[in-house]
Image (spheres, rainbow, N blue to C red):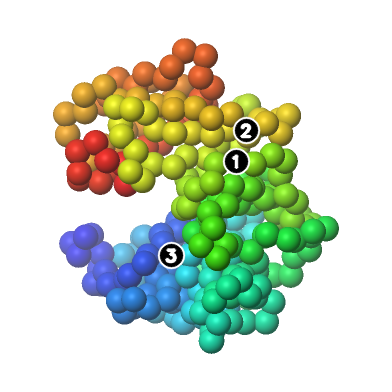
Protein backbone atom coordinates (compact mmCIF):
# COMPACT_ATOMS: atom_id res chain seq x y z
CA UNK A 1 0.00 0.00 0.00
CA UNK A 2 2.90 2.36 0.68
CA UNK A 3 3.83 2.30 -3.02
CA UNK A 4 0.39 3.55 -4.11
CA UNK A 5 0.37 6.82 -2.19
CA UNK A 6 2.56 9.90 -2.21
CA UNK A 7 2.61 9.98 1.61
CA UNK A 8 2.79 7.10 4.10
CA UNK A 9 -0.44 5.26 4.87
CA UNK A 10 -1.50 6.08 8.45
CA UNK A 11 -1.50 3.32 11.03
CA UNK A 12 -5.10 3.16 12.20
CA UNK A 13 -6.89 0.81 14.58
CA UNK A 14 -10.59 -0.17 14.63
CA UNK A 15 -10.85 1.48 11.23
CA UNK A 16 -13.79 2.28 8.96
CA UNK A 17 -13.19 3.31 5.35
CA UNK A 18 -15.71 5.54 3.56
CA UNK A 19 -15.51 6.57 -0.10
CA UNK A 20 -16.61 10.10 -1.02
CA UNK A 21 -17.16 9.97 -4.80
CA UNK A 22 -18.11 13.64 -5.22
CA UNK A 23 -14.69 14.75 -4.00
CA UNK A 24 -12.80 11.60 -5.03
CA UNK A 25 -11.53 11.04 -1.51
CA UNK A 26 -11.26 8.21 0.96
CA UNK A 27 -12.10 8.95 4.58
CA UNK A 28 -10.58 6.76 7.24
CA UNK A 29 -12.17 6.78 10.69
CA UNK A 30 -10.36 5.08 13.55
CA UNK A 31 -7.92 5.38 16.41
CA UNK A 32 -4.23 6.30 16.13
CA UNK A 33 -3.41 4.03 19.10
CA UNK A 34 -4.18 0.43 19.97
CA UNK A 35 -7.31 0.13 22.07
CA UNK A 36 -8.35 3.75 21.55
CA UNK A 37 -11.79 4.90 20.49
CA UNK A 38 -12.16 5.39 16.71
CA UNK A 39 -12.82 9.12 17.01
CA UNK A 40 -10.15 10.44 14.61
CA UNK A 41 -10.46 11.06 10.87
CA UNK A 42 -7.91 10.89 8.03
CA UNK A 43 -8.48 11.91 4.40
CA UNK A 44 -6.87 10.62 1.22
CA UNK A 45 -7.02 12.66 -2.00
CA UNK A 46 -7.09 9.88 -4.59
CA UNK A 47 -5.78 12.08 -7.42
CA UNK A 48 -2.62 13.12 -5.58
CA UNK A 49 -2.16 10.22 -3.17
CA UNK A 50 -1.83 12.67 -0.28
CA UNK A 51 -3.02 11.65 3.19
CA UNK A 52 -4.14 14.31 5.67
CA UNK A 53 -4.89 13.98 9.37
CA UNK A 54 -5.62 12.83 11.89
CA UNK A 55 -8.30 15.29 12.92
CA UNK A 56 -9.90 14.63 16.31
CA UNK A 57 -13.68 14.91 16.28
CA UNK A 58 -15.32 16.18 19.46
CA UNK A 59 -18.69 14.92 18.18
CA UNK A 60 -17.28 11.37 18.11
CA UNK A 61 -15.11 11.59 21.22
CA UNK A 62 -14.91 8.22 22.96
CA UNK A 63 -17.53 6.61 20.71
CA UNK A 64 -17.18 3.02 19.50
CA UNK A 65 -19.34 0.71 17.44
CA UNK A 66 -20.98 3.39 15.28
CA UNK A 67 -21.92 3.15 11.61
CA UNK A 68 -20.78 5.49 8.83
CA UNK A 69 -22.36 5.96 5.38
CA UNK A 70 -21.67 8.57 2.70
CA UNK A 71 -24.59 10.66 1.42
CA UNK A 72 -23.87 11.89 -2.14
CA UNK A 73 -26.70 14.42 -1.93
CA UNK A 74 -25.55 16.17 1.25
CA UNK A 75 -21.88 15.40 0.55
CA UNK A 76 -21.56 14.30 4.16
CA UNK A 77 -20.75 11.09 6.02
CA UNK A 78 -23.80 10.17 8.11
CA UNK A 79 -22.66 8.58 11.38
CA UNK A 80 -25.12 6.92 13.72
CA UNK A 81 -25.11 5.35 17.17
CA UNK A 82 -22.26 3.84 19.10
CA UNK A 83 -21.34 3.48 22.75
CA UNK A 84 -19.11 5.31 25.21
CA UNK A 85 -18.06 4.63 28.75
CA UNK A 86 -20.17 6.37 31.35
CA UNK A 87 -17.27 8.71 32.11
CA UNK A 88 -17.17 9.86 28.50
CA UNK A 89 -20.90 10.14 27.91
CA UNK A 90 -22.38 13.15 26.15
CA UNK A 91 -25.69 15.00 26.52
CA UNK A 92 -28.45 12.95 24.95
CA UNK A 93 -26.76 9.59 25.47
CA UNK A 94 -28.94 6.84 26.92
CA UNK A 95 -27.55 5.12 30.00
CA UNK A 96 -27.92 1.36 29.50
CA UNK A 97 -26.19 -0.59 32.25
CA UNK A 98 -22.58 0.56 32.50
CA UNK A 99 -22.60 1.96 28.96
CA UNK A 100 -23.80 5.24 27.51
CA UNK A 101 -25.48 4.39 24.19
CA UNK A 102 -25.97 7.02 21.53
CA UNK A 103 -28.90 7.61 19.18
CA UNK A 104 -27.23 10.73 17.77
CA UNK A 105 -26.74 11.37 14.09
CA UNK A 106 -23.44 13.09 13.31
CA UNK A 107 -22.66 14.66 9.92
CA UNK A 108 -18.99 14.63 8.94
CA UNK A 109 -17.92 17.14 6.29
CA UNK A 110 -15.07 15.68 4.18
CA UNK A 111 -13.93 19.13 3.05
CA UNK A 112 -12.61 20.11 6.48
CA UNK A 113 -13.01 16.86 8.51
CA UNK A 114 -15.35 18.61 10.92
CA UNK A 115 -18.39 16.90 12.44
CA UNK A 116 -21.63 18.29 13.84
CA UNK A 117 -24.62 16.67 15.55
CA UNK A 118 -27.83 16.69 13.47
CA UNK A 119 -31.06 16.87 15.45
CA UNK A 120 -33.58 14.10 14.69
CA UNK A 121 -37.02 13.21 15.97
CA UNK A 122 -39.14 10.10 16.48
CA UNK A 123 -42.62 9.29 17.71
CA UNK A 124 -41.17 6.66 20.04
CA UNK A 125 -37.40 6.31 20.20
CA UNK A 126 -37.43 3.51 22.79
CA UNK A 127 -34.68 1.09 21.84
CA UNK A 128 -33.18 3.23 19.07
CA UNK A 129 -29.78 3.81 20.71
CA UNK A 130 -27.34 0.97 19.98
CA UNK A 131 -23.85 -0.02 18.94
CA UNK A 132 -22.28 -2.64 16.65
CA UNK A 133 -25.23 -2.39 14.26
CA UNK A 134 -25.35 -2.44 10.47
CA UNK A 135 -26.53 0.36 8.22
CA UNK A 136 -27.16 1.31 4.61
CA UNK A 137 -27.83 4.75 3.18
CA UNK A 138 -30.07 4.65 0.09
CA UNK A 139 -29.73 8.03 -1.71
CA UNK A 140 -32.65 7.54 -4.10
CA UNK A 141 -35.02 6.92 -1.18
CA UNK A 142 -33.40 9.62 0.99
CA UNK A 143 -33.23 7.11 3.81
CA UNK A 144 -30.75 5.56 6.22
CA UNK A 145 -31.58 2.02 7.33
CA UNK A 146 -30.22 0.61 10.60
CA UNK A 147 -30.53 -2.99 11.79
CA UNK A 148 -29.27 -5.21 14.61
CA UNK A 149 -26.56 -4.31 17.08
CA UNK A 150 -26.42 -4.52 20.86
CA UNK A 151 -27.94 -2.82 23.91
CA UNK A 152 -26.38 -3.66 27.27
CA UNK A 153 -24.98 -6.89 25.84
CA UNK A 154 -28.34 -7.97 24.39
CA UNK A 155 -28.29 -8.50 20.63
CA UNK A 156 -31.11 -6.72 18.82
CA UNK A 157 -33.19 -7.76 15.80
CA UNK A 158 -35.18 -4.62 15.06
CA UNK A 159 -34.70 -2.28 12.11
CA UNK A 160 -35.15 1.49 11.80
CA UNK A 161 -35.45 4.00 8.95
CA UNK A 162 -34.25 7.61 9.12
CA UNK A 163 -35.93 9.94 6.63
CA UNK A 164 -33.13 12.21 5.40
CA UNK A 165 -35.61 14.88 4.30
CA UNK A 166 -37.47 15.29 7.59
CA UNK A 167 -34.80 13.73 9.86
CA UNK A 168 -37.45 11.57 11.48
CA UNK A 169 -36.90 8.01 12.69
CA UNK A 170 -39.43 5.22 12.14
CA UNK A 171 -39.22 1.67 13.47
CA UNK A 172 -39.79 -0.86 10.70
CA UNK A 173 -42.36 -3.62 11.22
CA UNK A 174 -41.55 -7.08 12.44
CA UNK A 175 -38.44 -8.50 14.04
CA UNK A 176 -35.44 -9.32 11.90
CA UNK A 177 -32.33 -11.36 12.73
CA UNK A 178 -30.69 -10.68 16.09
CA UNK A 179 -27.14 -10.02 14.86
CA UNK A 180 -24.16 -7.77 15.52
CA UNK A 181 -22.34 -5.89 12.77
CA UNK A 182 -24.54 -7.23 9.97
CA UNK A 183 -24.10 -6.38 6.32
CA UNK A 184 -27.12 -4.34 5.19
CA UNK A 185 -28.06 -3.72 1.57
CA UNK A 186 -31.10 -2.60 -0.42
CA UNK A 187 -32.51 -4.06 -3.62
CA UNK A 188 -34.22 -1.18 -5.49
CA UNK A 189 -35.92 -3.44 -8.04
CA UNK A 190 -37.78 -5.38 -5.36
CA UNK A 191 -37.89 -2.47 -2.90
CA UNK A 192 -36.51 -4.85 -0.30
CA UNK A 193 -34.05 -4.51 2.55
CA UNK A 194 -31.55 -7.35 3.01
CA UNK A 195 -29.45 -8.24 6.03
CA UNK A 196 -26.57 -10.71 6.09
CA UNK A 197 -24.41 -12.13 8.86
CA UNK A 198 -21.26 -13.79 7.60
CA UNK A 199 -18.80 -14.05 10.49
CA UNK A 200 -18.31 -17.73 11.27
CA UNK A 201 -20.48 -18.86 8.36
CA UNK A 202 -19.53 -21.94 6.36
CA UNK A 203 -19.38 -21.31 2.62
CA UNK A 204 -20.57 -24.82 1.74
CA UNK A 205 -23.50 -24.66 4.17
CA UNK A 206 -24.73 -21.33 2.86
CA UNK A 207 -24.53 -17.67 3.83
CA UNK A 208 -27.53 -16.54 5.82
CA UNK A 209 -29.63 -13.69 4.43
CA UNK A 210 -32.83 -12.11 5.72
CA UNK A 211 -35.09 -9.96 3.56
CA UNK A 212 -37.72 -7.43 4.64
CA UNK A 213 -40.35 -7.15 1.90
CA UNK A 214 -42.98 -4.51 1.19
CA UNK A 215 -45.55 -6.25 3.39
CA UNK A 216 -43.32 -5.90 6.45
CA UNK A 217 -42.50 -9.61 6.63
CA UNK A 218 -38.96 -10.91 7.17
CA UNK A 219 -37.85 -13.91 5.09
CA UNK A 220 -34.92 -16.05 6.19
CA UNK A 221 -32.73 -17.80 3.66
CA UNK A 222 -29.44 -19.65 3.51
CA UNK A 223 -29.30 -18.17 0.08
CA UNK A 224 -25.74 -18.52 -1.15
CA UNK A 225 -23.61 -21.62 -1.37
CA UNK A 226 -20.23 -21.86 -3.02
CA UNK A 227 -19.06 -25.12 -4.58
CA UNK A 228 -15.48 -26.16 -3.78
CA UNK A 229 -13.65 -22.80 -3.68
CA UNK A 230 -10.09 -23.35 -4.82
CA UNK A 231 -8.50 -20.40 -3.07
CA UNK A 232 -8.91 -18.07 -0.12
CA UNK A 233 -9.74 -15.35 0.48
CA UNK A 234 -12.86 -15.48 -1.67
CA UNK A 235 -13.64 -12.22 -3.47
CA UNK A 236 -16.48 -12.61 -5.92
CA UNK A 237 -19.45 -10.74 -7.30
CA UNK A 238 -22.87 -12.35 -7.54
CA UNK A 239 -25.59 -10.87 -9.76
CA UNK A 240 -28.73 -12.97 -9.75
CA UNK A 241 -27.18 -16.42 -9.75
CA UNK A 242 -24.22 -15.60 -11.98
CA UNK A 243 -20.75 -15.15 -10.49
CA UNK A 244 -17.37 -14.42 -11.89
CA UNK A 245 -15.22 -17.08 -10.24
CA UNK A 246 -17.36 -19.66 -8.45
CA UNK A 247 -20.48 -21.71 -8.93
CA UNK A 248 -23.00 -20.23 -6.51
CA UNK A 249 -26.14 -22.30 -6.00
CA UNK A 250 -29.11 -20.53 -4.44
CA UNK A 251 -31.84 -23.00 -3.39
CA UNK A 252 -34.86 -23.11 -5.67
CA UNK A 253 -37.62 -20.77 -4.58
CA UNK A 254 -35.28 -18.74 -2.40
CA UNK A 255 -35.47 -14.98 -2.88
CA UNK A 256 -32.21 -13.21 -3.58
CA UNK A 257 -31.13 -9.59 -3.83
CA UNK A 258 -30.84 -8.36 -7.38
CA UNK A 259 -27.08 -7.96 -7.00
CA UNK A 260 -24.78 -8.99 -4.21
CA UNK A 261 -21.12 -8.48 -3.44
CA UNK A 262 -19.18 -10.93 -1.31
CA UNK A 263 -16.45 -8.55 -0.28
CA UNK A 264 -14.28 -10.17 2.33
CA UNK A 265 -13.48 -13.67 3.51
CA UNK A 266 -10.83 -14.59 6.06
CA UNK A 267 -7.86 -16.74 5.16
CA UNK A 268 -9.21 -19.63 7.26
CA UNK A 269 -10.63 -22.09 4.77
CA UNK A 270 -14.40 -22.13 4.85
CA UNK A 271 -14.80 -19.27 7.31
CA UNK A 272 -16.32 -16.00 6.18
CA UNK A 273 -15.03 -12.82 7.79
| Image location of residue 182, percent across then percent down | 48, 47
Which residue is depicted at the point 71% across and 30% down? Answer: 214
In this view, the residue in front, 191 or 220, is 220
| Image location of residue 230, percent across then percent down | 16, 29
- In the picture, which quadrant includes the N terminus? bottom left
| Image location of residue 178, percent across then percent down | 54, 46
Measure how far apart labels 1 and 3 are at the Cα level: 31 Å
Is residue 29 rendered to the left or right of residue 189? Answer: left
Question: Which residue was labeled with disc 2?
Answer: 218
Q: Are marks 1 and 3 in contact (CB under 8 Å)?
A: no
| Image location of residue 47, percent across then percent down | 36, 60
Question: Which residue was labeled with disc 3?
Answer: 27
Which residue is depicted at the point 49% across and 59% down? Answer: 132
Q: Earlier in the sequence, mark 1 or mark 2?
A: 1
Secondary structure at numbered mark 2: strand
Whether residue 228 can be seen here = yes
Which residue is depicted at the point 46% across and 22% down? Answer: 240
Question: Which residue was labeled with disc 1?
Answer: 176
Q: Are marks 1 and 2 in contact (CB under 8 Å)?
A: yes
Label 1, residues with CA under 10 Å away: few <14, some 14-19, many ≥20: many
Amino acid sequence: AEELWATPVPEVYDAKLVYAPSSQELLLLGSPVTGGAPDHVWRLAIATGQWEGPAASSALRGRRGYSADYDPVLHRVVIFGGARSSLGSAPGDEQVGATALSSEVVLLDPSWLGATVRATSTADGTGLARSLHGSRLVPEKRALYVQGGTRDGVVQGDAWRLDLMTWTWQRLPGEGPAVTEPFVTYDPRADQLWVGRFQGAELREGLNLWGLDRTGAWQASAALRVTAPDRFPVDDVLSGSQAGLYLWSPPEGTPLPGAYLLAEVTATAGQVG
